[in-house]
């Protein structure tokens, strides 16, 4: 009684045609409406009014009669089910009526016990004690009846989810026992009435707990077996995402046969926020045929930036094209995402173009471009945008915030634009932004980097709350200005000595030529139970002799692997550089191949390494792989690959790469690239073209450029162009002995001994002398 009807009676057989089943087997005739199990069930329904009548009657026999009726109903509840299964007498009418009879009997009994107080001294407030479990049990039965009615219209998996389980049977047994004890305890002639009531109430609470728990289990089974609608699924995915339950969110999404755009957006947002692999959202979207909307695109752009794959202009360009074709190019969130994504690829021209085409800009739009310019080294552009932002404000009326101020102060510090930075400081104070510790740290760092150390220190000392960034900013300022002792003194006084502070001190010591002090500081750091991180290793490996050797590189590499730092881009770059300089280029290649996310820095490191070892063809191949894979090269990359081309005589390739800098990548060549191109042309005998390139340079040629032309002329043996370059080098760096020696040798090789002697006299005239070579036997 109180048990569930689903799964308890034998399923009614399918109808047959002319007494024969569809498979040809004989089919029994349709069951009758009134079978013995059905008659017993009808009897239980009829017994409910009789139970109520005897419950309210007076007399010593009334309680016994009520208890007997309830026990008879319980026995027939088991008996009709047994007969229906054993004799195959189940009918649709009986399957419907059986749970109704059970619930009527149980509900009536619970209500009766709650409405007529139990006169028991041990439990004075019996009705109140019974009300709570009665509500729980009746509520559970009503809920399960509604769920089973709905499940009948669903698939087989849902029906199985609401079928009777062992927990339900235990619930029924405890429930029957508790109600029998409570009904029997109303007979005053029975001994130990208090014990009967106490046991009955306790068992009723146990039954209520089992009822609630079984309902929860059924709900979980139903949830797992139901294919939710797209609307409900989207809400569930968002709910799970807010609770950081990504596995459950993905499970709901995977259960949808045809996810709508709302479901797609919900799962993409969940992945971008909580997936340990930030590129998971991108991969999921790439494997689908979904037609994105503006929310989809903005989510993917955020995921792209977070994934570390934002160095790929191909993916960013494809998303931009989709946004343009679907009419979302002017959408505020999409445009903001495009600005950040393009900036992360290094394509500042495209980021600026997207910003310029926006019909409406909020503070995020301005901050996206201003901070991107600060990160990309477009410091003057950053200051110009800030001035424009202050003047026009955003479309929603908002002005600069803490993000704006920190980005602009960084640009001011790099440009040493003290006056501009002071005005930004004043604006921050007037706007109340100086209450933000991040802004205050930026202000301290700005004054320190501009050389105003005393004022920066006053600001630092005046801070009520300092963090590791506060100390790092001031220590870096001291170190940059050569005030090593002041920096070390502040380091000793710092009460927030996180790993970033230790790293700042080590970088400062190396910058000031005190590499010998770094090992002692490293040992002190480890003793203080602050373990080196990837940034620590990246700082010390290139400069500290103990880590620049093969043994040091291996030890640092092993430590990185044990601590999961071996995928840090800066550390990978340092390892490749250390291995290649130690003469183990193959080890550097292996580090590169094992790196999962190869940003510009990693590609540049391996290209520089193979170029330094004279592997020009491999350097070119790596450069082409880098570009075709969507990674954007920077100026250091171009210098490395152009240098490789120059030393192996690949002029055509050098010319193509050099002119692609501006045309394809929007990068203006600097002195280093011009020097490499001049070297490539002059070494190939194209001295006239090399001189034309020098004369057309938008920059003032320095010693690197003229030195490249002189060395190229020496390789070819062209005295005229060699002297042309030497005369300019004599003005720029008259005390560089190398220039005199190259020019003197060039004259000697051409048989012009007098001119060679004149160059040697010039060398002695400026107080220099060539160190004679010797051979040790």
Image (tube, rainbow, N blue to C red):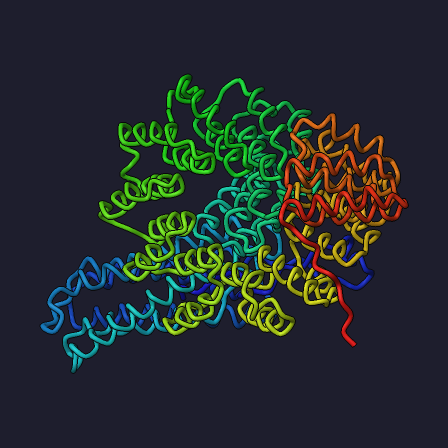
Quadrant into which the N terminus falls: bottom left
Residue 152 in view? no
| Quadrant position of residue 682 | top right
Residue at point 22%, 45% (across, down): 462
* Identity of the residue furthest to the bottom in this view: 191
Question: In the displayed structure, does residue 721 sit left or right of residue 769?
Answer: right
Q: How many marks?
A: 0
User: Above or below — where is 660 with respect to 535?
Assistant: above
- x and y percentages locating residue 535 in the rendered image: 51, 58
Question: In the displayed structure, does residue 130 sit left or right of residue 729?
Answer: left
- x and y percentages locating residue 504 in the rendered image: 43, 55
Question: 448 or 334: nearer the eye?
Answer: 448
Quadrant into which the C terminus falls: bottom right
| Quadrant position of residue 517 | bottom left
| Quadrant position of residue 692 | top right
- x and y percentages locating residue 556 in the rendered image: 57, 69
Residue at point 76%, 67% (across, down): 774
Residue at point 64%, 28% (across, down): 323
User: Above or below — where is 55 with respect to 562?
Assistant: above
Question: In the displayed structure, does residue 591 sit left or right of residue 120?
Answer: right
User: Above or below — where is 347 with respect to 526?
Assistant: above
Question: 187 or 425: nearer the eye?
Answer: 425
Residue 642 in view? yes
- x and y percentages locating residue 507 in the rendered image: 47, 56
Residue at point 52%, 62% (across, down): 540
């Amino acid at each position: 009684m109180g048990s569930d009807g689903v799964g308890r009676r034998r399923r009614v057989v399918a109808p047959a045609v002319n007494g024969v089943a569809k498979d040809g087997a004989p089919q029994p005739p349709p069951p009758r409406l009134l079978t013995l199990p059905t008659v017993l069930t009808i009897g239980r329904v009829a017994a409910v009014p009789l139970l109520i009548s005897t419950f309210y009657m007076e007399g010593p026999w009334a309680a016994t009669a009520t208890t007997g009726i309830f026990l008879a109903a319980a026995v027939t509840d088991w008996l009709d089910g047994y007969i229906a299964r054993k004799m195959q007498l189940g009918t649709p009418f009986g399957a419907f009526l059986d749970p109704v009879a059970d619930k009527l009997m149980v509900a009536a009994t619970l209500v009766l016990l709650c409405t007529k107080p139990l006169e028991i001294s041990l439990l004075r407030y019996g009705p109140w004690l019974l009300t709570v479990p009665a509500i729980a049990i009746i509520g559970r039965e009503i809920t399960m009846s509604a769920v089973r009615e709905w499940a009948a219209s669903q698939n087989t998996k849902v029906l199985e989810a609401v079928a009777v389980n062992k927990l339900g049977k235990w619930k029924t047994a405890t429930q029957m026992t508790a109600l029998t004890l409570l009904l029997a305890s109303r007979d005053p002639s029975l001994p130990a009435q208090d014990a009967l009531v106490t046991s009955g109430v306790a068992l009723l609470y146990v039954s209520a707990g089992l009822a609630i728990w079984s309902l929860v289990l059924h709900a979980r089974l139903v949830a797992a077996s139901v294919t939710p609608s797209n609307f409900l699924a989207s809400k569930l995915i968002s709910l799970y995402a807010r609770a950081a339950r990504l596995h459950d969110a993905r499970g709901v999404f995977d259960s949808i046969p045809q996810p709508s755009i709302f479901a797609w957006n919900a799962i993409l947002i969940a992945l971008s926020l909580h997936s340990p692999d930030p590129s998971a959202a991108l991969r999921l979207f790439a494997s689908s045929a979904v037609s994105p909307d503006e929310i989809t695109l903005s989510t993917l752009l955020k995921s792209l930036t977070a994934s570390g794959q934002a160095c790929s202009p191909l993916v960013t360009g494809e998303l931009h094209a989709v946004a343009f074709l679907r009419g979302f190019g002017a959408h505020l969130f999409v445009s903001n995402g495009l600005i950040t994504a393009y900036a992360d690829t290094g394509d500042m021209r495209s980021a600026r173009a997207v910003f310029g085409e926006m019909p409406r800009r909020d503070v995020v739009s301005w901050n996206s471009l201003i901070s991107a310019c600060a990160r990309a080294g477009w410091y003057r552009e950053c200051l110009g945008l800030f001035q424009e932002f202050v003047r026009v404000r955003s479309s929603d009326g908002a002005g600069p915030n803490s993000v704006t101020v920190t980005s602009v102060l960084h640009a001011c510090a790099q440009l040493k634009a003290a006056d501009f930075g002071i005005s930004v400081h004043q604006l921050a104070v007037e706007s109340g932004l100086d209450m933000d510790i991040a802004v205050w740290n930026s202000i301290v760092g700005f004054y320190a980097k501009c050389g105003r150390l005393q004022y920066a220190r006053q600001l630092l000392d005046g801070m009520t709350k300092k963090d590791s960034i506060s100390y790092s900013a001031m220590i870096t300022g001291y170190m940059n200005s050569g005030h090593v002792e002041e920096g070390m003194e502040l380091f000793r006084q710092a009460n927030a000595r996180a790993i970033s502070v230790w790293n700042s001190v080590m970088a400062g010591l190396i910058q000031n030529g005190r590499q010998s002090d770094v090992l002692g500081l490293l040992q002190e750091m480890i003793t203080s139970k602050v373990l080196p991180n990837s940034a620590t290793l990246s700082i010390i490996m290139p400069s500290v002799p103990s880590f620049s050797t093969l043994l040091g590189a291996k030890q640092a590499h092993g430590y990185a692997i044990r601590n999961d730092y071996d995928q840090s881009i800066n550390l990978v770059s340092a390892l490749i550089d250390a291995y290649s300089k130690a003469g183990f280029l193959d080890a550097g290649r292996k580090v590169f191949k094992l790196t999962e996310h190869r940003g510009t820095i990693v590609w540049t490191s391996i290209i520089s390494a193979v170029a330094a070892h004279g592997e020009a063809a491999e350097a070119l191949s790596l450069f082409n792989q880098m570009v075709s894979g969507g990674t954007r090269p920077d100026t250091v990359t171009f210098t490395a690959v152009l240098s490789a081309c120059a030393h192996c005589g690949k002029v055509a390739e050098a010319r193509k790469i050099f002119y692609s800098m501006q045309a394809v990548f929007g990068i203006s060549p600097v002195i280093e690239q011009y020097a490499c191109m001049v070297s490539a042309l002059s070494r190939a005998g194209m001295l006239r073209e090399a001189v034309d390139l020098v004369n057309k340079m938008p920059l003032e040629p320095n010693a690197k450029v003229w030195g490249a032309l002189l060395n190229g002329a020496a390789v070819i043996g062209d005295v005229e162009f060699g002297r042309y370059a030497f005369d300019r080098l004599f003005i720029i760096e008259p005390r560089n002995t190398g220039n005199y020696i190259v020019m003197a040798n060039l004259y000697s090789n051409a048989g012009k001994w007098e001119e060679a002697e004149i160059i040697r006299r010039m060398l002695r005239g400026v107080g220099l002398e060539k160190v004679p070579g010797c051979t040790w036997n």
